[in-house]
Amino acid sequence: MNSEKTLHVGSPNIGELEAFWERAQFIFQEKWLTNRGKLVQQFERELAKFLGVKHCISMCNGTVALEIAIRALSLEGEVILPSFTFIATAHALQWQEITPVFCDISPDTFCIDPCKIESLINPKTSAIVGVHVFSRPCDVDALQRIADRHGLKLLFDAAHAFGCSYGAKTIGGFGNCEVFSFHATKFFNSFEGGAVTTNDDQLAEKIRLMQNFGFAGYDNVVHIGTNGKMTEICAAMGLTNLENIDSFLRVNKRNYDLYREKLSGLKGLELMCFDEAEKCNWQYIVVEVEETFPLTRDKLMEKLHRENVVARRYFWPGCHRMQPYRSKMQSLGQRLSITESLSSRLLVLPTGTAVGPDDISRVCRLIAECN
Ligand code: T4K
């Protein structure tokens, strides 16, 4: 067994623990653990400010945030989304008996390809869900134009894009609403957590009610709802990590630059690039393993795993080839060629504050040995 330190893709970014312990003490002093406590309220205010959006409604996780947003927008029938995403995006729709209609992605952004959407629209279509994959934004303007032309709702899954921008505007205020995940593995985490952000007052009000069983006051239920609440300890973690966001960013950028330097010149291996004019969280180190590389992507991953480098092949094989959705796609006879090709060639490498320069040298040395 290899004794070298295990390196993970999703090792959490954790801020100053002193500040976290202080907040934890405050929670126990107040004896207020959940149900819109003071820390959750502060968390929502600070996040809305950070994201430059009017409303931020915190949630227990990103999946429930998606489910509530979908419900609050009254989506039904069919919804168009990329297959190249974490399975939660598709499940959040199917869970509510809405049919996910998978669309191919653009090879330039790895996000839903606006040119391929309109042929999928029919009278049953109620919305488009764009996913800002690996910190890079969707073509928001093109998606909005299509949504407007066909009278469709537009929702963004922004789980990967906290602190990123589109057209120099921070992601969070686009479409009807955007949904974040603050899972441990995300750039910005609150252990588990999520949020829906929007500039629409009425939608925000509805989402807030739905997140807390529809309660408006102690005994007054005015809406159907569920339990999507964030706890105080999660807000404590979120507030602490928000204070440390700049240092997370610095480490991620340093790591990205090191990977770029050490992987440059390797034949058949392409590091995913970012638009330097946009804000980016640099949380994803994604390499494309081309046919000219001596190992296949899967063989390279196996080699790295044997050496305790837990690289991940997100989002292989694509939601449309996962068991719950596969048979439906087969019956439609549809293929998503870019999704299928990219998902068989992309590999995500470890980064984040738990990964230092020596670790990156080790990962790159292992990759270079194959070349
Ligand atoms: N939309 C998108 C586009 C998403 O990517 C996600 C979640 C969602 C929606 C849903 O949001 P949430 O409901 O999760 O808030 C992980 C995460 O669990 C998931 O949150 C994330 N996307 C997805 C991309 O990655 P897995 O099944 O790959 O997790 P797991 O346990 O294999 O962990 C990933 C790596 O992180 C491992 O190598 C171990 C490491 N790790 C993990 C945890 C939890 C750590 O080092 N420390 C930790 O505490 O899904």
Image (tube, rainbow, N blue to C red):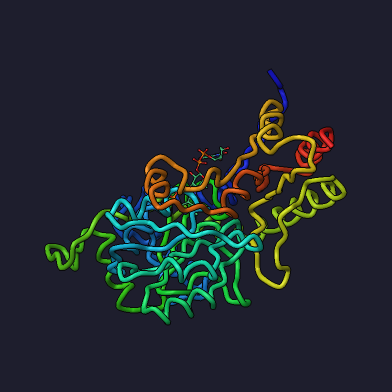
Does residue 159 appear anywhere in the picture? yes
Q: Position of residue 352 (x, y in %)?
A: 65, 48
Check the picture and name the quadrant holding the N terminus. top right
Q: Residue at x 64, y 35 (%)?
A: 310
Residue 209: quadrant of the picture? bottom left
In the displayed structure, does residue 147 sit left or right of residue 116? left
- Outermost top residue: 1
In the displayed structure, does residue 61 sit left or right of residue 282? left
Check the picture and name the quadrant holding the C terminus. top right
**Viewer-side residue, 299 vs 335:** 335
**Viewer-side residue, 43 vs 6:** 6
Does residue 230 appear anywhere in the picture? no
Q: Position of residue 307 (x, y in %)?
A: 71, 27
- Outermost right residue: 265
Q: Residue at x 31, y 55 (%)?
A: 228
Q: Position of residue 328 (x, y in %)?
A: 37, 48
Residue 160: quadrant of the picture? bottom right
- Outermost left residue: 219
**Viewer-side residue, 222 vs 369:** 369
Q: Position of residue 269 (x, y in %)?
A: 78, 47
In the displayed structure, does residue 77 sit left or right of residue 21? left
Residue 202: quadrant of the picture? bottom left
In the displayed structure, does residue 259 sit left or right of residue 145? right
The number of numbered discs placed on residues in the rendered structure image is 0
